[in-house]
Image: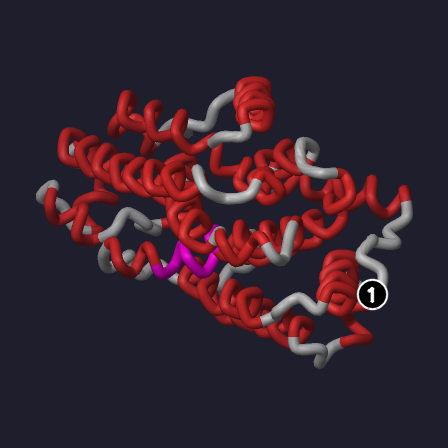
């Protein structure tokens, strides 16, 4: 059994372009990761981008649930014919078969993404940690598994905390979009601590309280980032590149804390060149 992807140069170029369009941060991080595992990480990152974007592609939740079920069937090996015709599904199934990758975490990622299809508020921090754990954290852990299966046994704590931090940073950057949709990812207990609930946060009528909620959410993310950094001190160098995408979180937290309620109408996302420099520096230092 070979550990090397047989992806052609043309297919690789097209799929990299798709990732760049769908998830520029992970695309930039991928370019700094070990070359011998990039194709396998590309499969994971594209799968994540596919299921994360389903809300953007459907008008109602039911078609989104149908699409997530299709991905579950692909992962379970029940749609081999259809998977072979889908470039991302084909690449992912090839990775799973060649490396005997576990599919349960990938199916759990699909299950967690059902939350994205609806406008139910995030109940509390524990619920958010569970959601982030099955999405961003799971992707980090699977990336570490691809890089070094043996060493990845030591990365679960770091993956858990770094994934939560990364998810918080992502939701802070997407606040203008989620606000327009009526989605609230800020945990309900953080909202209530600032005198808000879902409806009052979405109304925008209390900008000072909204600013406090945004800062509390950023602080929640920073707490997990600090815990991730502590956990990463003892992991093998072979898996450290898997955590590069989380290197962008700290700057997002700082910008959110500075801008407060302005995050609801203007994204705190930094220019691409700054994100690229931050990732390059993190790769050079071997730290996030």
Most distant residue in the bottom direction = 78
Give residue 202's quadrant in the image.
top left
Q: Residue at horizontal 14%, vertical 29%?
A: 208
Q: Position of residue 197 (x, y in %)?
A: 16, 50
Give residue 279's quadrant in the image.
top right
Label 1 element class: loop
Using residue 200 as the reference point, say whether residue 223 is left or right of it: right
Q: Position of residue 176 (x, y in %)?
A: 38, 36
Q: What residue sits right under mark 1 in the picture? A: 85
Residue extent of the magenta highlight: 130-137
As displayed, is residue 118 above or below residue 43? Answer: below
Q: Residue at horizontal 28%, vertical 39%?
A: 223
Q: Residue at horizontal 55%, vertical 43%?
A: 236
Which is the main secondary structure of the residues drawn in magenta? helix
Mark 1 neighbour class, 10 Å CA radius: few under 14, some 14 to 19, many 20 or more: few
Residue 180 showing in the rendered view: no
């Amino acid at each position: 059994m070979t550990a090397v992807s047989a992806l052609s140069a043309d297919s690789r170029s097209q799929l990299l372009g798709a990732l760049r369009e769908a998830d520029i941060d992970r695309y930039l991080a991928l370019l700094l990761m070990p070359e011998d595992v990039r194709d396998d990480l590309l499969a994971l990152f594209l799968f994540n981008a596919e299921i994360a974007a389903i809300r953007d592609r459907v008008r109602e939740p039911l078609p989104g649930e149908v699409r997530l079920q299709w991905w579950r069937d692909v992962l379970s090996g029940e749609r081999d014919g259809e998977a072979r015709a889908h470039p991302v599904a084909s690449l992912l199934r090839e990775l799973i078969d060649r490396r005997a990758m576990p599919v349960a975490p990938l199916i759990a990622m699909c299950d967690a993404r059902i939350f994205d299809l609806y406008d139910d508020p995030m109940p509390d921090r524990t619920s958010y940690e569970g959601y982030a754990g099955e999405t961003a954290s799971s992707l980090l852990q699977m990336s570490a598994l691809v890089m070094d299966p043996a060493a990845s046994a030591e990365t679960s704590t770091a993956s858990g905390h770094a994934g939560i931090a990364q998810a918080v940073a992502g939701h802070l950057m997407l606040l203008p979009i989620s606000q327009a949709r009526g989605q609230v990812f800020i945990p309900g207990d953080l909202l209530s601590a600032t005198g808000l609930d879902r409806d009052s946060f979405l109304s925008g009528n209390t900008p000072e309280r909204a600013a406090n909620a945004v800062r509390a959410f950023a602080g929640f993310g920073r707490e997990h980032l600090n815990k991730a950094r502590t956990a990463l001190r003892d992991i093998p160098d072979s898996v450290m590149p898997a955590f590069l995408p989380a290197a962008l979180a700290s700057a997002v937290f700082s910008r959110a804390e500075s801008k407060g309620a302005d995050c609801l109408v203007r994204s705190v996302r930094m220019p691409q060149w700054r994100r690229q420099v931050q990732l390059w520096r993190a790769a050079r230092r071997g730290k996030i």
